[in-house]
Amino acid sequence: MSQNKVILGSEEWCSFPELGIPTIKARVDSGAKTSALHAINIAPFIKNEANWVRFDINPIQNNLKTVIHCEAPLIDKRIVKSSSGFREQRYVIQTNLEIGDSKWPIEMTLTNRDSMGFRMLLGREAMSGRVLVDPEQQYLLGQPTSDSLKELYKNSAKASTGLRIGVLASNPELYSNKRIMEAGEMRGHEMHFLNIKECYMKLDADTPEIHYRGGIILNQFDAIIPRIRPSITFYGCALTRQFEALKVFCLNSASAITQSRDKLYSLQLLLNSGIGIPTTGFANSPLDTNDLIKMVGGSPLIVKLLEGTQGKGVVLAETKKAAESVINAFKSVNANILVQEFIKEANGKDIRCFVIDGKVVASIQREAMPGEFRANIHLGGTASVINVTMEEKRIAIKAAKAMDLKVAGVDIIRSSKGPLLLEVNSSPGLEGIEGATNKDIAGEMIKAIEKNFKIK
């Protein structure tokens, strides 16, 4: 009977007493099948011989200092395809929902909803038979005031550990940069976004300085996280070196970033460390194009611009004639290129291992769109969770060490000869790997800084 159902607007406040969440704003969405709750630091464990999961939640939107530590029985794991196209494995819990004067058990998936407008999504499975939705209304069951929210969550704020950390980058709206800022703030640090183009330096033997727009002096930072896009490598690394001269801890050093951006030099360093790569050729002149093609096993082959990134400047030449045309075209404009063996058996897939402080913290498989050989997420590739082998982990850790990078995205391809290393990225993106794995990679980066300062 409709008169026995709860009438909700498109947005409502609800609570989860068993999780210790006194109130949280939910998006009421009958178009979504499953309910979802924002969660980070998700970890399964055994309790009383049963499967449980623990996780943290920032229940108030845009408030990362308020944290609730939750535990719940684990009832399932499901592969969910998000609206952005990422496939991710989500843990599923069941707990009681309280909304208005009503209370009933619902199932929810746990996922990082930092990029969403609501910490909670109430889907139709949880509402079926119990709820009517008036999409033109909001907060039909009331909403808390700012003061009442502070009172409800007064005991939930984390203590500050007090480091002053700068994110040295170009775009504050980029997912990765926002997540790093949020992760640092959530762990109690003072976070500052520093736009590379708005920093300038004073080179002086006695009083070296870095200034920011308006003349602000940036000499009082404990740590810097360089997130330098390839087009601004020179100046970004110059600033990083200046911070290093001021004895500021940099999560990746300027020298490590510089050598990682030189694809030819980085491959030589990796080979010197005994790490296998696809057979690669390099030449400065188009005169020996035929021998260059033969050197890497003939066509099909890959032609890469040394300055390319995110799959740009990478061409698959399927025939010898096409390879000659591409190589000669690049050479005619004095572009530096690598010619590389094409690993057909990879089927447009590669593995991204995210290495932080000498440990693989997460791995995903990236798969190219149909008809595309490049698996980069920026080019429409999809990401999914994968269990990497011990050998692949060993290669990723060894590669990051060879490049002297504390944070690295290491790309590996599976071939008939075994795993081969494709590339090492000094500013790897977080969106694909966090979305697919549900892991707080940004938080792991902050922990690496804390470890340097011996903060537990």
Image (tube, rainbow, N blue to C red):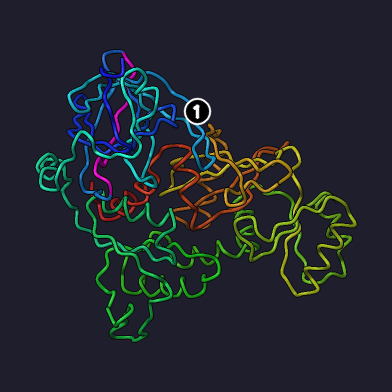
| Depth order, front residue of 357/362 | 362
Q: Is residue 18 above or below residue 231?
A: above
User: Residue 208, how many percent across, how many down?
Assistant: 32, 82
Which residue corresponds to the image point at 37% horizontal and 85% vertical from the top-left?
Answer: 203
Against 42, residue 263 (above or below) is: below
Residue 106, quarter of the rendered image: top left
Asked if residue 149 is positioned above or below residue 208 in the image, the reply reads: above
Nearer to the camera, 106 or 227: 106
Residue 295, image quadrant: bottom right
Magenta extent: 50-61
The mark tally for this picture is 1
Q: Circle 1 is placed at which residue position?
A: 79
Q: In x, y percent, where is residue 278?
A: 71, 49
Q: At 44% from the left edge and 32% from the top edge, which residue is drawn?
A: 31
Q: Is residue 404 left or right of residue 68?
A: right
Quadrant occupied by the N terminus: top left
Can residue 210 be seen?
A: no
